[in-house]
Amino acid sequence: MLAGCGVKASSNAITLKKTVNGLAATLTTNTQPGINPVVVLLTDQNGKPVSDALVSGTLNMSEMVMEGYPKEIKFNREENGKYSGLLQVSMEGIWHFDLKITSPKGTVQDIPYVITFQVK
């Protein structure tokens, strides 16, 4: 998925798509605990890539208090609406990932995801 970044690819990938106010965000990551690549693809209501946004996120396991969490995730802008980052998941369980997308005009969209990480 992210070749050359020192993170092993896994067959435990999950893809989640949500649309909010005409903005579609497709999130792909691995579901194993550890350091996982995460890719977000953004498209507008016409299916065109959104390549000029600022993308960030917050990862948290809300069922328990954990040192170092919530963790801020920064995304690198790539091309054709693709943004990439790394999720550091310390243990199995249900995690909440809140994606924040800021347009060049300053409009902010928050898109929540719930991901279950487990050892397979």
Image (spheres, grey):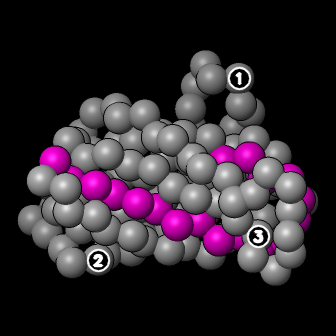
Q: Which residue is mark 1?
A: 6
**Number of marks present in the image shown:** 3
Residue 27 in the image, given as x and y percentages of width and height? 48, 59
Q: Are marks 1 and 3 in contact (CB under 8 Å)?
A: no
* Closer to viewer: mark 1 or mark 3: 3
94 drawn magenta? yes
For disc 2, the neighbor class at 10 Å (few under 14, some 14 to 19, many from 20) is few
In the rendered view, would you say 58 is above or below 5? below
Label 3 and label 2: CA atoms lie apart by: 23 Å
Label 1 and label 2: CA atoms lie apart by: 33 Å
Q: What's drawn in magenta, residue-wise?
A: 87-104
Inspect the image, locate mark 3, and give the three-letter code of the amino acid beneath it: Met
* Closer to viewer: mark 3 or mark 2: 3
Q: Which residue is mark 2?
A: 20
Q: Main secondary structure of the magenta part?
A: strand
Q: Which residue is mark 3?
A: 61
Looking at the image, which is closer to me, 45 or 74? Answer: 74
* Closer to viewer: mark 1 or mark 2: 2
